[in-house]
Image (cartoon, rainbow, N blue to C red):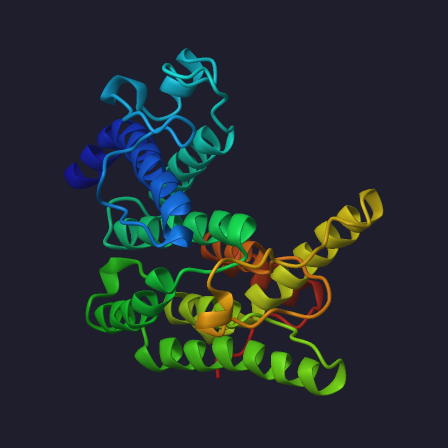
Amino acid sequence: MADEAMQHFLHTPFAVVSFVFGSMIGSFLNVCIYRMPRNESIVKPRSRCPKCGVMIAWYDNIPILSWLVLRAKCRHCGQPISWMYPLVEALTGVLFLLVFWRFGFTLASPCYMALAASMVLVTFVDLTDWTIPNQVTFPGIPLGIALSVVGMFYPASELVVTDVFDSVLGVLLGGGSLYLLDKISLLVLKKRGMGFGDVKLLAMLGAFLGWRNVLLIIMLASVLGSIVGIAMLLISPHTAKKPAPREGDEETGREQPKGYYLPFGPYLAVAGLITLFLGNAIIKAYFSFLNVGQPVPF
């Protein structure tokens, strides 16, 4: 009882700390979003204005607040600062807060905060550069599998996946399903259906959330992508377009896609986060709607 009372007493201040810490991580994510596609170091040099190149002082680099105080303009050159910067910081802060509310004082909280941060990074890089960083997905897949092993021996961790076979099957089903869809699209439509970054991203989500949740992620991402894609095409038929070719593509062999596309990574990321927070409730509601009771474990 004493431990429960102490946790309840500390819950509010730790929730605030979670948001503040998340917004600080979001500030670092802004650096990654800008530099990763350009193959620049995310460690040095210090943050600088992308317009005038002047190093940003610490008091002008406070998440969210600095953007508001400076009225969205650089202190030195007066050029506008994109609204994306405070959006990423606030979004990451809110996600960290939600993770703490959902998982509390458990091992799952820092693990899923890291997952949420990676989904924010993936979303904005894919929206701006049409790529999904390997620096996120390649280490993310074995990390998700490793956490499932931890969950097997430490049930109090509150991790979503507590069976390594569930995690490995999630990797195979997540990556394999999109890879197969891409091959079918190439065979039938003669063009790419999915980027390989999407394949690796869903494999990573499968490692963290298990194979059953992969099916839910695919369904949610498809619905979200369809709704947003149709709406954007109705508003502006030229919204869906090819990724812009980048310097050096010919030398590196980067394939130039045929046709017109919308990035699918953001929808997978959003669907993964929805599944993290509400996956069990959605699955239970679905089977209740079908009047078949609880899903049979298999």
Relative image position of residue 121 (x, y in whole percent): 42, 49
Of 231 and 274, nearer the camera is: 231
User: Which residue is at 25% across, 21% downward?
Assistant: 57
**Residue at the outermost bottom position:** 187
Relative image position of residue 83 (x, y in whole percent): 51, 28
Res 34 → quadrant: top left
Relative image position of residue 168 (x, y in whole percent): 37, 80
Of 283 and 244, nearer the camera is: 244
User: Which residue is at 78% across, 47% downward?
Assistant: 231
Do we see residue 102 in this rendering? Answer: no
Res 186 → quadrant: bottom right
The N terminus - image quarter: top left
Do we see residue 108 in this rendering? Answer: yes
Looking at the image, residue 268 sits to the left or right of residue 61; the answer is right
Q: Relative to residue 94, is residue 150 depicted above or below?
A: below
User: Which residue is at 69% across, 80% downward?
Assistant: 185
Of 228 and 254, nearer the camera is: 254
Relative image position of residue 153 (x, y in whole percent): 19, 72
Looking at the image, residue 17 sits to the left or right of residue 166; the answer is left
Looking at the image, residue 12 sits to the left or right of residue 241; the answer is left
User: Which residue is at 30% across, 58% downward?
Assistant: 158
How many marks are shown on the rendered structure?
A: 0
Of 54 and 31, nearer the camera is: 54
Q: Relative to residue 36, is residue 50 depicted above or below?
A: above
